[in-house]
Image: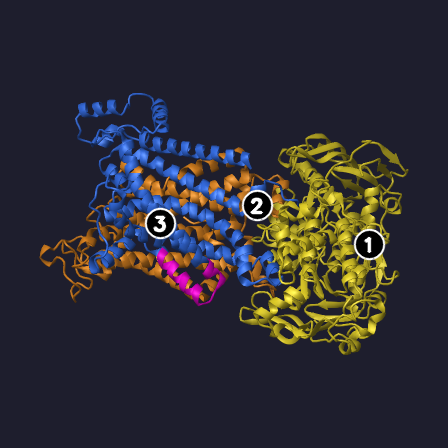
Chain colours: A orange, B blue, C yellow
Amino acid sequence: MSEPNPVDETAPESAQAAPAEGAAPAGMVRTTLRSLLRSGPATAGLVLVAVHVLVAVLAPLLTSYAPTANAPDSALLGPSAAHWAGTDALGRDVLARVLYGGRYALMVSFAATACAVALGTVVGCAAALKGGWLDDLVMRVLDAVLAIPPILALLVVVTVLGAGPAVIVLAVTVVYAPQVVRVVRAAAMGVAPLDYVTAARARGERTLSILVREVLPNIADVVSVEFAMRASWVVLLISSLSFLGFGANPPTPDWGLMIAENRTAMTVVPWASLAPIIALATLVLGLNLSADGLAKAWGVDRVKEAR
Amino acid sequence: MLTFLTRRLLSAAGTVLLASVLVFASVQLLPGDVATQVLGQDATPEAVSALRDQLDLNRPAVLRFAEWLAGAVRGDFGTSLVSGEPVAGALWLHLRNTLLIAAATVAVAVTSSIVLGVVAGLYRDRWPDTLISSLTLAGMSVPEFVVATLLVMALSISVPVLPAVVLDGASAPVADLLPSVVLPTIALSVVMTAYIVRMTRTSVIDVMASEFVTTARLKGLGAWRVVVRHALPSALLPTLNVIAMNVAWLVGGVVVVENVFNYPGIGKLMLESVHSRDLPVLQAVAVVGAAVYVLCNLAADLAAMALNPRLRTGERSAR
Amino acid sequence: MSTGQAPHTGAESEAGAGAQARTPGTGARQGDEGLYLREVPARVKDLSVAYRSNGRDITVAENVSFEVAAGRTLAVVGESGSGKSTVAGALLGHLRHGSRITSGSVEVAGRDVFSLGGRDLRALRAHDIAMVGQNAGNALTPSMRVGTQLEEALMARVPARAERRAEARALLEKVGLPGPDRIGRRYPHQLSGGQQQRVAIAMALAARPRVLVLDEPTTALDVVTQARILDLVADLSAELGLATVLVSHDLGVVARMADEVVVMREGAVVEAAPAAELFAAPRHPYTRRLLASVPRVSDAGLAEVGEDGTRTVRDRAPVPEDAPEVVSLEDVVVRYGRSRAVDGVSLGLRRGEVLALVGESGSGKSTLAWSLAGLRAPASGRMRLHGEQEGDLAAGARKRPLALRRRIQLAFQNADTSLNPRRIAREAVRRPLRFFGLASRSDADARARGLIEDVALDPALSDRLPQQLSGGQRQRVGIARALAGGPDVVVADEVTTALDVSVQASVLALLDDLRTERDLAFVFISHDLAVVRGIADRVAVMKDGRVVEEGPVGAVFAGPNHPYTRRLMEAVLEPDTAGGAGSDAAGGAAGAAPDASEGPDGAATQGTAEGEWIDLGGGHRIRRGGE
């Protein structure tokens, strides 16, 4: 019944002399970008994330070493012209492993975050709009899932299903979606009693149509901030898993794994541990700064719900 | 107020129950045969069938859950597949050790983060805030195992004042474990503080901008009184929830940090049971984790009642 | 915009004299005869305030000057954005985050407020000046007992604890709160709005200030409570010889309270004069327009205001005798949980008629309206639509057939939330057209544009987002959206309440036009009797979920009335030019007496001879009892 909505929002430029600074969605993206870029920390955050993505994609072009090539005769070397960050106990080039190391973390984290945020948004909106028993049920189950500490839940799942990337994505989705549901539900509940939603309800519009037309556009900001913030936690969680030996499998270059492998040799080759630490920390820092920047640009209260 | 308390207690019990259903279900009902999972693909059929008997897998899951629950309520979490001993004994011993770290962390992190958060909020956009906020961001961007690793490097290897690795077993007396508690506590506190500080700061800024704080100021009250009597009770309310949620994280964070220090706590127990696929232990640890989380939330709610008369008096607002 | 225009009169009567008489002391404090010997504790000189936004300075107040003498009340009047609240805050040395003084000074009790350091400023606030804000619900600290907060305000003056307690008790008594011991132990959320405001006043008086600043002190209150609070303030400032600064958008309140008036617009003072003079002969065209825009209970129809502030009352188009009924309600009950928000209401509405539902908040008028619109199904009773589309309205919106649903449409109070902020105005109007199948995809845009023109908006605005429209423009778009369904009945829920008076007048005129052009029936919900007098054909007065009086607007306003209606009418304040310095219909009747119905426990003690009506003829009837 709700016919596709022609993109009416693109028109506002034709209205001359708009009085306020705000603009239509197309303009909103621009306004947001502008205010993001005006903030130094936010720009730095976006740049950090972008650099990490680029490095992960272009890793083969940036180093001539294979990240998994053992070279027992050049093990545990300090930084040199040949190996800028030295080598690890198996003689692998640390820099190459760090450059490649973001691939696993970025891919798994991105997929898991996207799934968790998508699922959480749908369920959160449904709970907020439908209310009643559905809301009660959802909140009950959520409380129970939230009660199980994420890493314990992940370990249980990994024990039973194994540690493949698909399993981890699935498990992280299940573990983090409830928290997204909470945030999105609260945001949607803030929108639901507003008069324009009431008007749609009085017209007798279907819940799905109200959700898509009236609610989602107005909580898109919350959802985006949620995405950036969740991403930083998921990266941390997944690196913790790798560190414990349940994420990436050993020859794979991965930061969490590298820190676990090399920390015993820390006194001998500190860079083998420090390099992945720096890489990991800068990625998470970048995500955090971006989330803060987005939140500030949109006036979303980012820390209301921590973890 | 009493009815509120009873309701809250009942719902807490319900949450733990539901959580244990989820844990039980994910352990027992996930695709594939649990016995084969535990023993690996090339186990002999006899071994598999023996384990099936031991795990009672031939009986309906609902029945098994009921039995497990009946035992769990009485403190009996079944028998470990590895040691053949009751799960409960090892569980309580490790839990005791973990609580040492957890209690110390909560004490350190909550105190320091509220102080830092309030300072940052009050000095908004001035140097104390900038400093605290930058440190906070750094703390949030480093996983706890990195902090732990760096601490080991600094305080156990470079300047050896504290033990890097715990050599005691789980049953060591508390006094022997105390020196080993320090580094894990610092590692966990750094990360936990970062999150709570942010919440406290935002909340303090919100409340300081509120009309009632303005009114208190315009009454000519001193700054200290305005902050402590008028602003703080309201500012700490949202912080409470964040603290409770962080305790949930703490239970997880402890797993990682204990592993770094080889500390004989519940995290180490959990990891060992993951490696040995000791399902009964795993199940018990997860449920205990959920119970701890729920208890913390309950405590947060009670604290909220102390801070917010609206909850305490149970009367409707007159508007 | 008038920039830098100095007030052409500076409260002449005192200007010079006050300065000489400023011997801080006691002699000049009391007595009306001391007009020329008064102390002048508050002086604003050439004050300009600006804040920075996006690197630009935005002026919020410009060259504002005035003085207030002890025992006198000065009102600062203006519409939204006039800068009046900024001035109020500045008197206490308080500016909003990011604002600063760009010129001028504020002098309170002989001291330059903005040159004072932290300690001196605190002392000033503790001893010489106090403020009562708009919403005491937000101004009282939620986690502290009311009595404790009051005692705090006494700390600077009364060092001994026991004495403080006694004095706090006396203050609560003074502001007319019943059982001061009991009230003092309560938390703010346990008090009604009126009680909270009384506590706020007591807190302001605790310092025994010389200057009292009231920032929209009654805007959040019901009319009856408003009248009581204003009486209280007037009595207290006379008794204590306070120099009172009243900030308000409500000219009725100002007329009731003020000795002198300063009219502000866009940050600048456009006119300053003694109240009697200003209301009798406003000089500035803006003041004249402002005054003319205020609806009066005595108007027999809507007032139309000319550019120069001339005022003509428009004739009301009579509803034809034979107009058919479009909506009928019989014994409708709507529940919220256990309570009956609407408790047995029977009403009829005819085609082309405006039926006003009047009552205080909580009277059930909005619930009834929402029920009509299908947002909350009644628990019992009949509710039907008649005419070309017959149908049962007792079902919620989704259960009504599409053709029935569109016949009743809603327009909302709050212009800020009535439109989706992410969709342009045209889309808001276009959606119901498409949804109800009233326009094809190709002509929906043109139709929407047409409707926007019908509500007297420039069609160029149809491409704008709500935030790029003014409050009045948004409200018009909301009305266009209601019209899009092609309704027989429009339910207008306090549609003009949040608007400035001048905008309100134009929106009311629009509604009246639409009614005659389209033969629409309106259910017009309002708490403002003067607005109702102008627009409605019939009035139903609601109290505690029931209709206590109903009848043609002329008859109801002529009386006799139900006691509750009478109370509402007596509480109406108007800038009545004939009555000198404002008319106070309430007279001394209301007084500052404590009022049981304000308390949380005094809600419903009445309800004797139920359902008995006294018929006064011509459709005017009054329910017996219920008071």
Residue type, mark 2 in image: Pro
The answer to whether residue C188 of the structure is visible from this angle is: yes
Comparing C295 with B10, the one in front is B10
Image quadrant containing the N terminus of chain B: top right
Residues behind callouts 2 and 1 on a single chain: no
Q: Nearer the viewer, residue B135 or C352?
A: B135
CB atoms of marks 2 and 3 within 8 Å: no
Q: In the orientation shown, which residue stands out farthest toward the top?
A: B59
Give amino acid for label 1: Leu
Residue occupying image coordinates x 54% and y 63%: B223
- Image quadrant where residue C574 sits: bottom right
Q: In the orientation shown, which residue stands out farthest toward the left?
A: A73
Mark 3 and mark 1 in contact? Answer it, CB < 8 Å.
no
> Which residue is denoted by mark 3 in the rendering?
B105
Q: What span is in magenta?
A: B118-139
Q: Is residue C132 above or below residue A197?
A: below
- In front: mark 3 or mark 1? 3
> Tag 3: residue type?
Thr
User: Is the residue C163 above or below the residue C109 in the image?
Assistant: above
Q: Chain of mark 3?
A: B
How many badges with numbers are in the image? 3
The chain letter for the residue carrying disc 2 is B
How far, Cα to Cα, is label 2 from label 1?
Answer: 48 Å
At x 68%, y 68%, the residue is C266
Q: Return the mark for residue C302.
A: 1
Residue matched to label 2: B309
